[in-house]
Amino acid sequence: MRSCPSSMRSSETARGDHAPKGCAAHGGYPQLHERLGYLYAGNGSYASAAREFEQAPPRRRPGLWHIRIAELYGKAGDRSSQLAHLDLAAAEPLEPASRRYVERQRGFLYSQLGDTEHSIEAWRAAAAAGLDDSAIHLDLGFALLQLQRWDAARAEFLRSNEREPSPRTLYYIAQCYRKLGQPAIAIKLPQVG
């Protein structure tokens, strides 16, 4: 193992760090692929940057590393690679805010790629992770509508409307009641809002 340069040791330990940030032996120097990734990203070549970051080992938190790579693939327009890295990030331990972000993004991407079942799972995971806003329930309701799960979609639209009432949400609630064979409730519903 390579030792730290004495100049690095003295400046870093003066700040109270026990593992110098600039020491290659402690993972402080960016590796070649990581450096190239930053260069490519700075030049707007996001797919090349993502490929370089894929070859560089994550220094600390692998989940956040995969989120970074997923965002680069997203900027490059490669949805399937973006989703693959979000799936890898979802498998890692994440802080609650990162977990909500990952699950919400996975829900959107699965929906865009036509995989409604996985988008529903991801949006439910986002709600379970604490992202309990009207938009997540609205998105979940739309996904359930695609699968013609009228009762479950209605429940999600009702949750969305409880958090943020809107005529649009009431319209979809009424549509669910119509599909469930309860047109009398559907007719009365918009008058309630």
Image (cartoon, rainbow, N blue to C red):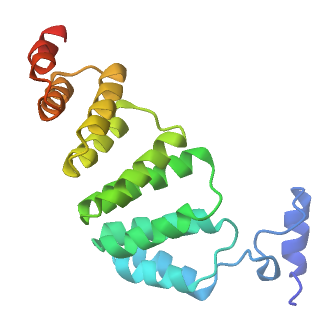
* Residue drawn at 82 percent across, 82 percent down: 25
Q: Is residue 2 above or below residue 53?
A: below
The reply, left or right, for residue 145 in relation to residue 67 is left
Q: Is residue 45 above or below residue 20?
A: below
Q: Position of residue 78 (x, y in %)?
A: 30, 74
The reply, left or right, for residue 46 in relation to residue 20 is left
Quarter of the image with the C terminus in it: top left
Residue nearest the observer in this picture, 54 or 136:
136
Residue placed farthest to the bottom in the image? 1
Q: Position of residue 10 (x, y in %)?
A: 91, 69
The reply, left or right, for residue 67 in relation to residue 165 is right
The reply, left or right, for residue 118 in relation to residue 184 is right
Quarter of the image with the N terminus in it: bottom right
* Residue drawn at 28 percent across, 40 percent down: 141
Q: Position of residue 182 (x, y in %)?
A: 14, 24
- Whether residue 43 is visible: no
Residue nearest the observer in this picture, 22 or 128:
128
> How many labels sit on residues?
0
Residue placed farthest to the top in the image? 192
Residue nearest the observer in this picture, 72 or 110:
110
Q: Is residue 61 above or below residue 187?
A: below
Give residue 71's quadrant in the image: bottom left
* Residue drawn at 27 percent across, 46 percent down: 144
Give residue 163's quadrant in the image: top left
- Whether residue 28 is visible: yes
Q: Position of residue 171 (x, y in %)?
A: 13, 27
* Residue drawn at 35 percent across, 20 percent down: 162
